Amino acid sequence: MPNIKFNYLYRDGGNYKKHISIVFANPTNIDLSDLERLIQSKLIFGEWFYAEEWKLPEIFTDIVYLRIDPTWHEFANVEYTDEAADESYFVEEFIQLIS
């Protein structure tokens, strides 16, 4: 089964966006729809999460105004991919972390 790509973004107070993806190794063939349901259940108001808490890279726009810009990130989607997994990212560990 292919690896899993986790797509998310940072959106600042002015609606400028910066996108990022992490590719998880998927050696145990985790089902994509099960993973997406789990992620959705852990999001803040069904959209946001703190990347640092989920051990994912934080991305911000070039200038951050903490008085108006959020510090959370926005979940976009997950998808299967044939891309190589990013070093040390395994979907099972991610599931345990956010569960």
Image (cartoon, grey):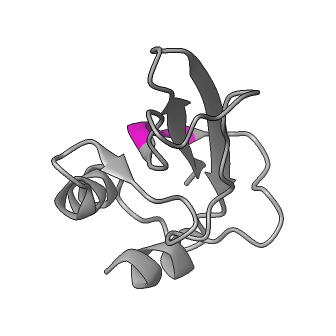
Asked whether 79 falls inside the magenta stretch, the response is yes
Q: Which of 81 and 9 is in front in this view?
A: 9
> Which residue occupies 68% across, 28% down?
61
User: The magenta stretch spans which residues?
Assistant: 74-80
Q: Nearer the viewer, residue 14 or 35?
A: 14
In the image, residue 19 lies at what x, y percent? 61, 28
- State whether the magenta stretch is mostly helix, strand or loop: strand
Corner quadrant of residue 42:
bottom left
Quadrant, the C terminus: bottom left
In the image, residue 81 lies at what x, y percent? 61, 38
> Which residue occupies 66% across, 50% down?
23
| 20 relative to 98 in the view: left or right | right
In the image, residue 45 lies at what x, y percent? 16, 48
In the image, residue 49 lies at what x, y percent? 38, 55
| 8 relative to 95 in the view: left or right | right
> Up-down: is 16 above or below 86?
above
